[in-house]
Image (cartoon, rainbow, N blue to C red):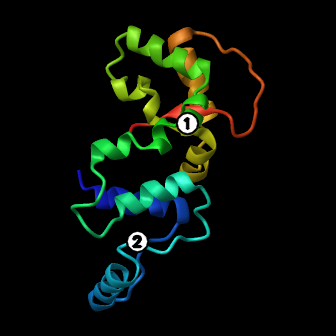
Amino acid sequence: VDIWSVGVALYLLITHKYPFESKNAFDLQQLYKKCQNERNGIIDRPSEIVDDNIWDLLIKLLDFNPIRRISAEKALKHSFFTSQQALSQITPQAKQIANKAQQARDKNITIYDTDSTYIVQTQEITRILKNDPEVEEQNIIIKYDGSITSKPKQEGTKCCCVVL
């Protein structure tokens, strides 16, 4: 896995801009040297990234030194995905849906869909994809449960499984 590219893509999803802006290869090389020499390989933190946990993951993904750069396995075990806060945002209904789908042997459901380390907040998904995961969740419920249960909508507390 090209972890550097994952870092660039994640940075782009969060900030809507690339971590390195340059007009040509020479300017990019100069920026690289400056980061290496003056900042120990760490890029500047943009104002759009307020969460320390995601910033920690990003600087590990975007480390200029490939030896120090985080591996794919370690990135997936990073606290951004596995912290108590991340795990607490998984709704019981989301867990139930994933278990029912897995029990139905749906070939589209993998361990990544049922493993809580692959959960991303709905508000982030909505912001990034400009799509409403709540609607998709209801479609999944209908598919595996045959009914829709109404539930109060609490902004920012819903979660959805995403394969990274």
The reply to whether residue 110 is in sight is no
Mark 1 lies on a secondary structure that is: helix
Residue 86: image tag: 1
Lower position in the chain sequence, tag 2 or tag 1: 2
Mark 2 lies on a secondary structure that is: loop
- The residue depicted at 64 percent of the width and 33 percent of the height is 158
As drawn, 12 above or below 97: below
- Residue 113 at x, y = what percent? 41, 27
At label 2, counting other C-alpha atoms closer than 10 Å, the crowd grade (few under 14, some 14-19, many 20 or more) is: some
Q: In front: mark 2 or mark 1?
A: 2
Left or right, 65 with reference to 159: left
CA–CA distance in space, label 2 to label 1: 25 Å
Q: Are marks 2 and 1 in contact (CB under 8 Å)?
A: no
- The residue depicted at 39 percent of the width and 9 percent of the height is 104
User: For the C terminus, which image quadrant?
Assistant: top left
- Disc 1 residue type (three-letter): Ala
- The residue depicted at 57 percent of the width and 9 percent of the height is 146
At label 1, counting other C-alpha atoms closer than 10 Å, the crowd grade (few under 14, some 14-19, many 20 or more) is: some
- Disc 2 residue type (three-letter): Ile
As drawn, 57 above or below 126: below
As drawn, 58 above or below 139: below
- Residue 103 at x, y = what percent? 40, 8
- Residue 101 at x, y = what percent? 43, 15
- The residue depicted at 57 percent of the width and 17 percent of the height is 141
Q: Residue 139 falls in which quadrant of the image?
A: top right
Residue 1: image tag: none
Left or right, 33 with reference to 67: right
What residue is shown with label 2? 42
